Amino acid sequence: MALPPGPRLPPPLQTLRLMARPVPLLERARRQFGDTFTLRATPVGPMVFVSDPESLKTVFAADRVNTIAPGRNLVLAPLLGPDSLLLLEGDRHLGRRRLMLPPFHGERMRAYAEVMRDATLREMDGWRPGRPFRLHSSMQEITLEVIMLAVFGVGRRRREDLRRALLDILAAVRSPVTIGVTMPGVRELPRFRELRRRVAAADAVLAAEIAEHRSDPDLDQRDDILSLLVAARDEHGEGMGDSELRDQLMTLLLAGHETTATALAWAFELLFGRPEAYRRLTAEVRQGDGGEYLDAVIEETLRLRPVVPFVGRKLLKPMTLDGHELPVGANVFCAIYLAHTNPATFPDPYAFMPERFLESPTETYSWIPFGGGTRRCLGATFAQFEMRVVLSSVLERVDLRTAGEGPQPMIRRNVTLAPRDGTPAVVERVLATEREGAPAPT
């Protein structure tokens, strides 16, 4: 069975382009070969990309007979650990997913709204009218604080140590070059040894925090996600060990911090580029009109700027996609960005139009910012809820304008696509500061 055609660039060059500037490479391949094509990267090998809704449905519906693409293990295992939910497969993945899902939904999740709002207001205390700042950096501060409090449940005396250690790791993995230094054969380079040192420092703090949670006689009174995971038991009455808890916490950090912060930065960037949408959303937030347009803004942001451009599966059974018969062992990648910019599904696909999500529901497999199937992002609902809280908390208190010089191009930051200059912004007007004792920006 022959794989679909693709660019004839040498595999090392395709690898570099896929790592550094994936969107131009994917779009060029789509223009030349259609919705389904093959890229060749080292050391993964041939990568079949699909983006039409029917193929995406077929791939995601078959998750029980697929494994994750091997590139994920190569890149993420040294950082996340072998028990990370992102790296588990088969029944073990499904069992752990069921165990970890409850804290990210329903009333438990909504209980974190105050943490999210307070983290946003604390960050806004440092914004000064007329003084440019980067929204992406501010959103990173907010989402890290939310993870520290809502997810890790870190006590005050250990919070700064963990914060410093986690920021060191995030800084070390920001560049797409990091993908290369975590691969076999180069893990003894000085850059990776330094990354290992930073991970070990974070591990020491996490181990102490896990031990403190386990020994807390009032554990059942705590509502942070770590407490819930420590107390969780599977169908056999077994819980997670310390090393697995560490891997899941590191996964939640790396999967939930940068991605949500980047999505928020893109939301502001896209709103700056369409003033009428910014005005409509601001009016809705300040009037308390129900949040329909806010949800549409979030959905359109995640459509036009999905922070992860593709996700992969390795086939354990033959599969026919878009007329191509693919063999066992084929690496299939669902091209999220290409699916979201398909003109057959989204007319005028490169325009930022939140209204499209008010007019009619989208097909299930045409809007997939969090992936799909049994491997759909565990924190998808949590991330959208956090975006709601942060956006509304900002817009109800300040008027912002862009401090940039035009639309922000996308750059690769590890596995995410971020605004190149961090979404520069300026506070034009402060409407209110409600937190008692907090100084109003001047």
Image: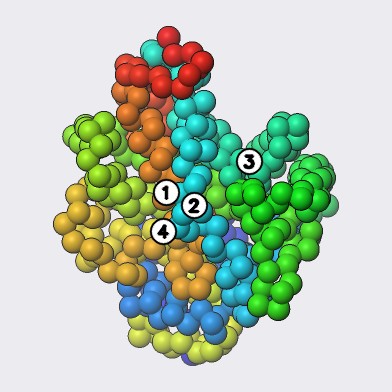
Mark 4 secondary-structure assignment: loop
Kindly report the distance in space between the C-alpha atoms of the residues bearing marks 4 and 3. 24 Å
From the image, tell me which residue sits under label 4: 369
Kindly report the distance in space between the C-alpha atoms of the residues bearing marks 3 and 2. 15 Å
From the image, tell me which residue sits under label 1: 385
Query: Is 423 above or below relative to 314?
Result: above
Q: Is residue 32 visible?
A: no
Amino acid bearing label 1: Phe
At horizontal 18% and vertical 61% (from top left) the residue drawn is 360
CB under 8 Å between callouts 2 and 1?
Answer: yes
> Is 133 situated left or right of 276 in this image?
right
Circle 1: is it few (<14), some (14-19), or many (20+) Cα within 10 Å?
many
Q: Nearer the viewer, mark 4 or mark 1?
A: 1
Q: Earlier in the sequence, mark 4 or mark 1?
A: 4
From the image, tell me which residue sits under label 3: 148
Mark 3 secondary-structure assignment: helix
Q: Nearer the viewer, mark 4 or mark 3?
A: 3
Query: Which mark, by number, is residue 109?
Result: 2
**Residue 233 position in % (x across, y down):** 68, 69
Circle 4: is it few (<14), some (14-19), or many (20+) Cα within 10 Å?
many
Q: Earlier in the sequence, mark 1 or mark 3?
A: 3
Query: Is 206 above or below relative to 94?
Result: above
* Camera-side residue of 197 and 96: 96
**Residue 153 position in % (x across, y down):** 66, 44
At horizontal 44% and vertical 80% (from top left) the residue drawn is 61
